[in-house]
């Protein structure tokens, strides 16, 4: 699973990658700092792969180019974008739509993050047992290696309920 998002969408791509890594073994967050590096990372994408791309106006050329390449190579392509007229839509097998308003100099990512959160939860429910096992292992590791600072007044249980 290749996940790509550039500029302000990069934080959304990182969010998806963080949680998908808990659910799948082969997740790659594609860095888009340069076109050549991006293509080096997706060079071997093919029909057994998925690319999830996130882009909103002003759409990233890096993400569009990666989508075209992934689609041409037979990968399943999923767009998270604002419109069926988005340049990502031309290459997408599936589109998840979310508005991204720009009310000031900063993009509002509230709606896209909500859609992404729903996607993560839905996939997590399908892979409930795998996710539960991973989180149980992570809790054991966190405790053994003292990853977190404990607070006496709060109980944190990150293992999903079955």
Image (tube, rainbow, N blue to C red):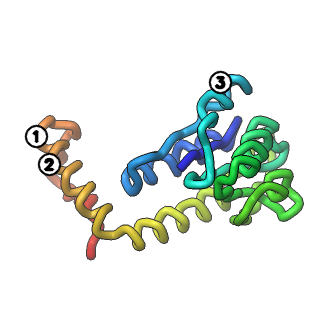
> Is residue 136 visible in this depiction of the protein?
yes
Asked which secondary structure carries label 2, the reply is helix
Where residue 53 appears, as percent x and y from the top left, is: 67, 50
Rendered residue at 23%/48% (across/down): 138
Residue at screen point 19% across, 43% down: 142
Q: Is residue 116 above or below residue 140?
A: below
Residue 55's spot in the image, x, y percent?
74, 48
Would residue 54 be seen by someone viewing this image from the given angle? no
* Residue 92 shown left or right of residue 122 in the figure: right
Residue identifier under label 2 = 140
Question: How would you rate the neighbour count of disc 2 (Cα within 10 Å): few for under 14, some for 14-19, many for 20 or more?
Answer: few
* Of 97 and 32, the residue lying toward us: 32
What is the number of callouts on the image? 3
Left of 110 or right of it: where is 144? left
Q: Position of residue 7 (x, y in %)?
A: 70, 35
SS state under label 3: helix
Whether label 1 touches label 2, CB < 8 Å: yes
Position of residue 161 relative to residue 67, above or below, is: below
Residue at 41% x, 66% y: name it: 124
Q: If the image is split into quadrants, where does the C terminus sit? A: bottom left
Which residue is more in the foreground, 30 or 5?
Answer: 30
Label 1, label 2: how far apart the Cα atoms are = 6 Å
Label 1: state its secondary structure: helix
Numbered label attached to residue 144: 1
Q: Residues within 10 Å of mark 3 (few under 14, many from 20)?
A: few
Q: Can you identify the residue that label 3 sits on?
A: 37
Is 83 situated left or right of 47 in this image? right
Q: Earlier in the sequence, mark 3 or mark 1?
A: 3
């Amino acid at each position: 699973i290749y996940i790509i998002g550039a500029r302000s969408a990069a934080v959304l791509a990182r969010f998806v990658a963080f949680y998908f890594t808990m659910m799948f073994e082969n997740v790659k967050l594609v860095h888009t700092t340069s076109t050549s590096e991006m293509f080096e990372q997706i060079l071997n994408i093919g029909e057994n792969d998925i690319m999830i791309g996130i882009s909103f106006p002003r759409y990233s050329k890096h993400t569009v180019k990666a989508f075209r390449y992934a689609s041409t190579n037979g990968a399943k392509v999923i767009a998270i974008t604002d419109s069926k007229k988005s340049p990502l839509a031309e290459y997408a097998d599936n589109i998840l739509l979310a508005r991204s308003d720009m009310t000031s100099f900063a993009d509002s990512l509230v709606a896209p993050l909500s859609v992404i959160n729903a996607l993560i939860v839905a996939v997590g429910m399908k892979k409930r047992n795998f996710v539960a096992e991973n989180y149980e292992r992570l809790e054991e590791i966190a405790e053994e290696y003292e990853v977190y600072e404990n607070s006496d007044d709060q109980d944190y249980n990150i293992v999903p309920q079955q």
